[in-house]
Image (spheres, grey):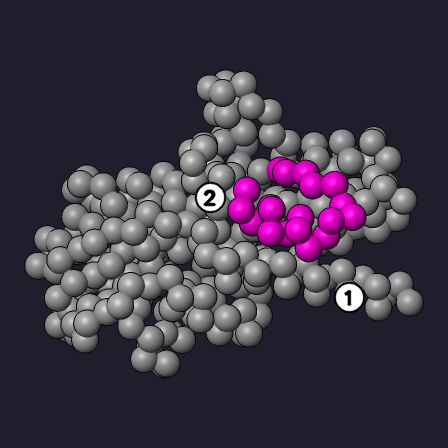
Amino acid sequence: MKKALLVISFGTSYESTRQKNIAACEQQLAACWGDRQLFRAFTSEMIIRKLRQRDGLQIDNPQQALKRLADAGYQDVAIQSLHIINGDEYEKIANEVRAYSHRFQRLVLGKPLLSSYDDYQQLLSALQAQMPPLAADERVVFMGHGASHHSFSAYACLDHLMVAQNFPALVGAVESYPEVDGLIDRLQLQRVRKVHLMPLMLVAGDHAINDMASSDPDSWRTKIAAAGIETQCWLQGLGENPLIRQMFVDHLDAALRQSQQEAA
């Protein structure tokens, strides 16, 4: 039986960060399932269109990838999402998997990064490993994407866990809650002298470069500096962290094991 490994992410139009984050995750997953042919898909139609028009690079969306695999005769397909939360983008994948399940003998989907309480604890350990040494009056502020989906609460949950465990970091989101203005109030109350800004996103793309690290008046860097707090930006996506890549491996392994148990 022909076996495939399909790795699905939101995508990015930045080639260097695509290699350091998305390709790195794909390669770590592929190394664990060497009997499967590796394939890629993005959920962002905007990024797919930009890459096609600008670079002549054709990348499938999840529906196209599943149709291509079914037409090519792959019957055992393991899919891993590289999304952070169980939001709109992950639901796109889950919906396509349900729609195409009749075309495969086995179709398995691994969960996003933050899908259980244990995931949050593992993520804290992984983030600790990439954080710089901090003085008592320094903090890391992680920028998440945010979501209109109800799963936006994952960011506040992670931030709450950090507070409860005296973890020297805060979490905010570009497009939902927690908002940066609230983070600044907390930093001032804690008399923080310096903040290290890091993306809580798979890749350090547009949001990290423009909304987090730029000199634009509305960027997090500018707003935090305007509050009298020194800022340093780190343009490193989560996909560069081997501990986080391993979390995706573990999620797919768990999904495959569950599939085997259900089939037994």
- Residue found 45% across the figure and 33% down from its top: 15
Estimate the x, y position of residue 207 in percent, counting from the top left.
35, 43
In the orientation shown, which residue stands out farthest toward the left? Answer: 228
Mark 1 secondary-structure assignment: helix
- In the picture provided, is 140 more to the left or to the right than 57? left
Q: Amino acid at mark 2?
A: Lys
The answer to if 37 sits in the magenta stretch is yes
- Residue found 88% across the figure and 48% down from its top: 105
Regarding residue 88, the answer to whether it shows in the image is: no
- Residue found 75% across the figure and 54% down from its top: 108
The answer to whether the residues at label 2 and label 1 have Cβ atoms under 8 Å apart is no
Estimate the x, y position of residue 97 in percent, counting from the top left.
73, 47
Residue 119 got which mark? none
Regarding residue 225, the answer to whether it shows in the image is: yes
- Identify the image quadrant of residue 210: top left
Q: Which residue is mark 2?
A: 20
Mark 2 secondary-structure assignment: helix
Q: How many marks?
A: 2
**2 or 1: mark nearer the eye:** 2
Q: Earlier in the sequence, mark 2 or mark 1?
A: 2
- Residue found 86% across the figure and 35% down from its top: 73
Q: Amino acid at mark 1?
A: Gln
Estimate the spatial distance between the alpha carbons at disc 2 and disc 1, rounded to whole Å.
30 Å
Q: Quadrant of the C terminus?
A: bottom right
Q: In this picture, which residue range is highlighted in magenta?
A: 23-41
Q: Which residue is mark 1?
A: 258
On screen, residue 67 above or below 161: above
The answer to if 243 sits in the magenta stretch is no
On screen, residue 156 above or below 174: below
| Towards the viewer: 206 or 252 | 252
Estimate the x, y position of residue 196 in percent, counting from the top left.
24, 59
Query: 10 Å neighbourhood of mark 2: few (<14), some, or many (≥20)?
Result: some
